[in-house]
Image (cartoon, rainbow, N blue to C red):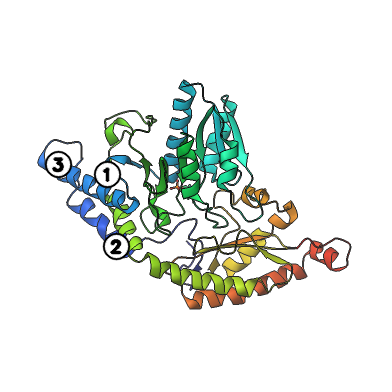
């Protein structure tokens, strides 16, 4: 392992977060004492069962859902798959084989609808414009008589923009179309009320708000049918087999309570740090902030710097102790530019030079200072050795930004 004692600035919280003390502390009793299988009929099992239901109720309360509307999953990806596949299958039974989504969803959504497309569904991918926001009017216009599902993410994981979910929910409810939102980046970071927002299906994942990895949930509004994809025992009311990971579920409930109780304070801190960083980095010549400046998560900013490669920027920043990302953790390692940045209309050569900084309430002013110092240095260095930058400066190529 590399030396992890070197002071690191962790600014990749959209990929995953450190676990909170509250989340870690909540797990331990379920590993040491309350280790029973909630399906066992004896006392040890029944104590676990009670704890399972208590945690379910706590998570439900934070979303203004009923406990019976929460189904535990292995994380956000599974919840997205189950929600979308269920709505598609149930729509298809009534001849509805059309899905509305956006061009910049997480791959857990995009790859699922792409597969459904190959299985005979028709998919409308809504334009997210330069600001990274879809409008309720676009959704309304896209809905047809044969629309089985609208799935629009709550907040984008690469650029942080927040969608008008309550308004989109109202459109879907009025037109009687099932509405799913991938709220993995939003839960614990912004207030969510599934009833007031007319949400039918919502995905969440604990490790994006300081809970354990490998655990999440799907909210399913009462009366909305969902199908079983993992067959086996009767856990999760027959919708998801497998012995429940009670320790991880307890971490999720504790983490969510913790972030919800401190949400305003956390958001204010992250917003302040985020804006400090944006104000400083935007001064780099030929740079651009991606996505709407205001309607964004407190912790996420994404910028492009012309004439450089995002991957090189990341490696040099890592060398300076700064952990950031060029977009989604899932696309790193591939040479294709981010589908999110392309969806904003950015040309390939600009989209390649992207940097995502995602903060949590654990970041400090010293972290922001380090980022504000390091990024301009690395960008200047990479430009100094870039043939593309040389061509831009000589006027052989036109600047885009
Ligand atoms: C992280 C993420 C997911 C996937 O969640 P996992 O729990 O890692 O499977 C899905 N959607 C969005 C928007 C995410 O940020």
- What residue sits 74% from the left and 55% below the top? 349
* In the displayed structure image, the side of residue 399 where residue 295 appears, left or right: left
Q: Is residue 59 left or right of residue 175?
A: left
Does the image show residue 8? Answer: no
Residue pointed to by mark 3: 46
> Which one is in front, 292 or 270?
292
- Label 2 element class: helix
Secondary structure of the residue carrying tag 3 is: helix
Could you tell whether 370 is left or right of 303 in the image?
left
Residue for badge 1: 67
Q: Position of residue 386 (x, y in %)?
A: 77, 64
Q: Of the residues under marks 3 and 2, which one precedes in the sequence?
A: 2
Circle 2 is placed at which residue position? 22
240 relative to 322, above or below = above
Q: CA distance from mark 3 to mark 2?
A: 24 Å
Residue 128 visible to the viewer: yes
């Amino acid at each position: 392992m590399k030396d992890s004692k070197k002071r690191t600035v962790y600014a990749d919280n959209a990929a995953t977060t450190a676990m909170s003390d509250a989340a870690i502390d909540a797990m331990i009793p379920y590993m040491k004492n309350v280790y029973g299988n909630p399906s066992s009929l004896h006392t040890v099992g029944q104590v676990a069962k009670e704890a399972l239901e208590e945690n379910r109720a706590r998570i439900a309360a934070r979303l203004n859902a009923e406990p019976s509307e929460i189904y535990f999953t292995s994380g956000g990806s599974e919840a997205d798959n189950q929600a979308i596949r269920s709505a598609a299958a149930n729509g298809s039974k009534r001849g509805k084989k059309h899905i509305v989504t956006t061009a910049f969803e997480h791959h857990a959504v995009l790859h699922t609808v792409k597969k459904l497309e190959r299985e005979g569904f028709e998919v409308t991918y809504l334009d997210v414009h330069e600001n990274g926001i879809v409008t309720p009017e676009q959704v309304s216009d896209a809905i047809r008589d044969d629309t089985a599902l609208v799935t629009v993410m709550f907040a984008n994981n690469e650029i942080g923009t927040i969608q008008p979910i309550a308004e989109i929910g109202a459109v879907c409810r009025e037109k009687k179309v099932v509405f799913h939102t991938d709220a993995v980046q939003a839960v614990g970071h912004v207030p969510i009320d599934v009833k007031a927002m007319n949400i039918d299906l919502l995905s969440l994942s604990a490790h994006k708000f300081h809970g354990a990895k490998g655990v999440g949930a799907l909210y399913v509004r009462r009366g909305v049918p969902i199908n079983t994809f993992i067959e086996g025992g009767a856990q999760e009311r027959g919708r998801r087999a497998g012995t429940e990971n009670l320790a991880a579920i307890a971490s999720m409930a504790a983490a969510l309570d913790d972030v919800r109780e401190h949400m305003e304070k956390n958001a204010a801190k992250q917003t302040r740090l985020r804006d400090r960083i944006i104000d400083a980095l935007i001064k780099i010549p030929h740079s651009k902030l991606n996505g709407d400046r205001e309607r964004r998560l407190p912790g996420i900013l994404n910028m492009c710097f012309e004439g450089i490669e995002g991957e090189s920027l990341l490696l040099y920043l890592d060398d300076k102790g700064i952990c950031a990302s060029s977009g989604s953790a899932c696309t790193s390692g591939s040479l294709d530019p981010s589908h999110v940045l392309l969806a904003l209309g950015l040309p390939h050569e600009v989209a390649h030079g992207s940097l995502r900084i995602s903060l949590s309430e654990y970041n400090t002013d010293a972290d922001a200072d380090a980022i504000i110092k390091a990024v301009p240095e690395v960008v200047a260095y990479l430009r100094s050795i870039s043939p593309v930058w040389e061509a831009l400066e000589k006027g052989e190529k036109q600047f885009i930004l």
